[in-house]
Image: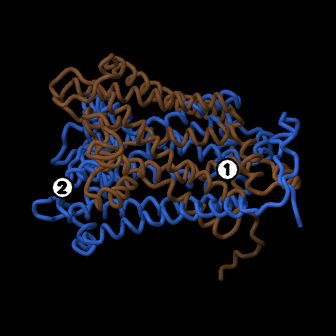
Amino acid sequence: MSTVDIDIPPQAGAPRGSASAEPRGHRLRLGDPIFRGLATASGVFLAVAMVGLGVVLVIDSWPAITGLGTKMLTTVAWSPSTGEYGALAALVGTFLSTIVAMIIAVPLALVIALLLVELVHPKVARVVGTVIEMLASIPSIVFGMVGIFTIVPFMQDHVVPWVLSTPLGKVPGIEPGPNYAGGGVSVFTAGVVLAFMVLPFITAVSRDVMKMVPQVTKEAGYGLGSTTWEVMRKISLRYANSGIVGAIFIGFGRALGETMAVAFLIGSVFTALPHSVFDPGTSIASLIALTFSEATDKLQISALIELGLILFVLTIVFQIAAQAWLRRVQRVTGGRA
Amino acid sequence: MSAVAETPQAPQMAPMRRRSVTGRKAADLVVKVFSWVGALFGIAVMAFVLYEVMIRGLKAWNVAFFTQTWPLDPMSTSGGMANAIVGTIIITAGAALIAIPIGFMAGVYLAEYGRNGRVATSIRMVTNVVMGVPSIIVGVFAFAILVKPLQHYSGFAGSVALAFLMLPVMARTTEDILNLVPNELRESGLAMGAPRWRVTLRVICKAARGGLITGATLAVVRVAGETAPLLFTALSSPYWITGLFGSGGYFGGPVANMTKSIWDGAQSPYPHMQALAWGGALFIMVFILGLNILVRVLFQRGKEW
């Protein structure tokens, strides 16, 4: 069977030289297999490269994994001179700052998503949504700089002294520990800035799942005389419930690995656990960022790469959980997530 | 067994409660106000960041900033970011050269060939997961495969790290955009007897041109502001890049770049270094937000916001 090789006009009616429609006769057809091969190879390369990333991390952190064992996860130490490394402080700092961020970002993201979906004209929602989406494109280092030069002094001079002067200041977890450094550079400040960095992601996913709530269900609610808030609380939020959990997972995974802004703000205390959110600490990512280029000791480099591996595994677990969850939601509710 | 089990269980109904209309309306109003305050707060934070960077950054913008190299002496009050600007452009362009073709072809594979097959599904899954991997880990990876074995930092290692971040984004956006092209277009192309690759490139990609350009631009813009992957790959340098090879070249040694210079400057105790960092932050932000807005305006098509 012979086919004719022709140029296809790109769109109906688009002007194009008609000469190209002439048959060119028989020819060995290598174009298709080559193109298909290239495309397949690229696709497979992508997957292999991503898996390779994990493999390389394991290989390069092997000396630390075998040399330090579980001490890496259970001790607080970071001393190239004695060769002792333990990531407990970094793990605690990472989770603590992420939790602070989520406590601020989740409610904020939810009310914004409600506004975008239910309350305002779609045109307004589009503008507001775009501005909030733009927050996501501001580089991490810029957040870090604004954080260190303006938010840190503000926290130190106003917010933290005020909180500590109230009865709350005596609550364990808020009452400053021995490393307290004025509260400006602290786990809390890092969490606050992180919150605004993950806000766009949580807002976007929550908005999408809230949009999946069937219009008829909501109209039924209004038909019974419900107010907008009642429809939101008893219908929309309930319906979108599990989707919102997925959104929170995605935000959590992002916040865990945020590096530059946290490195500026969390305070680089590698060898002590933060006693309170107002104490300085460190996070996995910022510990890597701050010490990697000066590390000369082989074990230290390996330990830092192991930290990377730990973070990698953590974020992947969160990603997989979020995606599996969102897929399930999509199946159950039949919408797009 | 108790004797009370006489009637079949009536469906559990919440007891009717009388609530005042005013109370319900008040609750409604409160929530609406909260939503508005929340959204305005989000916008205010955005505006505050822009304002802060603008005010401080503009002060640092002068001729020297755009023509001179990073000062060797931290106490000096001259110097600029010209070498870092050039370096960032080169490193980012290198990343784009690696990631755009491979990412595009991978996207073509997922949309046109793999579709819902097992291979494509697993590739898609891996890509989705890796899109959430922190950029610092990609930096560690590039360090492990390029810097450690070769015993020197290089701009190329930085490009590879950035390319790694771009690849999954590029592949998934390409796939999403190609999937928007109606199947009839594919079918009519094939029915005309054109080979598959030609239909893909000349018909489908042509139809999806706007989206593809937007996707690629946004993928590049996304990595242009990354710092973490460059910290221990491209490192930084107070000198101009000298070419491809040799200790000052792209493959041979550290290459100055904006984000690492901003990081160094911001940590410096000297006001002039901090000023340079602000100037750099403004530059990179204008570049990123500008391109972001530009492609949105040029190729606006049914974005879901």
Residue nearest the viewer, comparing B18 with A154: A154
Indicate left or right for B117 with A26 as reference: left
Pinpoint residue A211: horizontal percent, then vertical percent. 69, 44
Q: Quadrant of residue B86?
A: top left
Residue nearest the viewer, comparing B191 with A131: B191
Indicate left or right for A121 with A286 as reference: right
Pinpoint residue A266: horizontal percent, then vertical percent. 28, 44
Badge 2 amino acid: Thr
Chain B rendering hue:
brown
Chain letter of the residue beneath label 1 in the structure image? B
Residue at point 50% right, 44% down? B96
- Residue highlighted by disc 2: A271
Residue at point 47% right, 61% down? A316
Q: Quadrant of residue B127?
A: bottom right
Q: Quadrant of residue B240?
A: top left
Chain A rendering hue:
blue
Residue at point 72% right, 62% down? A30
Q: Nearer the viewer, mark 1 or mark 2?
A: 1
Q: Residue furthest left?
A: A81
- Residue highlighted by disc 1: B176
- Vertically, is B46 above or below A293? above
Badge 1 amino acid: Asp
> Can the viewer see residue A244?
no
- Vertically, is A111 above or below B176? above
Element on which disc 2 rests: loop
Total numbered labels:
2
Number of other residues with Cα within 10 Å of mark 1, as a class: few under 14, some 14 to 19, many 20 or more: some
* Pointers 1 and 2 within a single chain: no
Pinpoint residue A47: horizontal percent, then vertical percent. 54, 64
Indicate left or right for B233 with B267 as reference: right
